[in-house]
Image: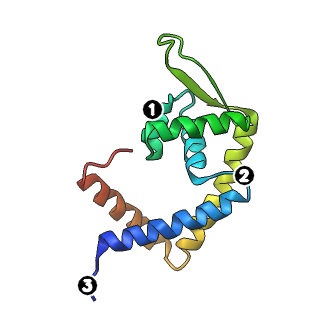
Amino acid sequence: MDLHIGYLLKRAQAALRAEMDKQLARHGLTTPQYAALSALENMPGLSSAELARRSFVTPQTMIRIVAGLEEKGLVTRSEHLVHGRILETTLTAEGQRAIRAGHKVVFDVERRMLGTLTEAERRRLGRLLKSCADALGSYD
């Protein structure tokens, strides 16, 4: 059997995304919204452009995502102290609750996806995927 790694990676990614979409929707979130909230949890005050890079979407898409999150009361935006045209985005208390709920959902989906692998296989898979991404000049 030929292993078409690109196809298998895309198939796994598509299955993961579909299940994340399904489970996050139960909590009123989309996968891109979860990615943005997660990035803000790790680095409060990011601009929409930086959020887009970290969430693998276009800046135009992220503008719509942030607007939706702001409408839901999950984030607030304020002018950057030095660069007034840049809006910094931070989580609200409700956004912090939403990301905690989102983490539980996503961690459960990942646990189920990796359920047949041993802990050593999981760590090895993580190292191998990182190596593949690094070889192509991936960004984090």
Find residue 28 and name its label.
Answer: 2
Q: Earlier in the sequence, mark 2 or mark 3?
A: 3
| Displayed quadrant of residue 74 | top right
The image's colour scheme reads: rainbow
Q: Is residue 32 above or below residue 90?
A: below
Between the residue at mark 2 and the residue at mark 3, the CA separation in whole angstroms equals: 40 Å
Give the class, few, some or many, for how many residues have Cα within 10 Å of label 3's Cα (few <14, many ≥20): few
Between the residue at mark 2 and the residue at mark 1, the CA separation in whole angstroms equals: 24 Å
Q: Earlier in the sequence, mark 1 or mark 3?
A: 3
Q: Quadrant of the N terminus?
A: bottom left
Q: Is residue 89 above or below residue 54?
A: above
Q: Is residue 114 above or below residue 76?
A: below
Find residue 2 and name its label.
Answer: 3
Report the amino acid beneath label 3: Asp
Give the class, few, some or many, for how many residues have Cα within 10 Å of label 2's Cα (few <14, many ≥20): few
Tag 1 residue? 49
Q: Earlier in the sequence, mark 2 or mark 1?
A: 2
Taking the spot 75% from the left edge, 38% from the top edge, the residue there is 94
Taking the spot 37% from the left edge, 74% from the top edge, the residue there is 8
Q: Answer yes or no: do the residues labelled 1 and 3 have beta carbons within 8 Å? A: no
Q: Is 46 on the left-hand or right-hand side of 56?
A: right
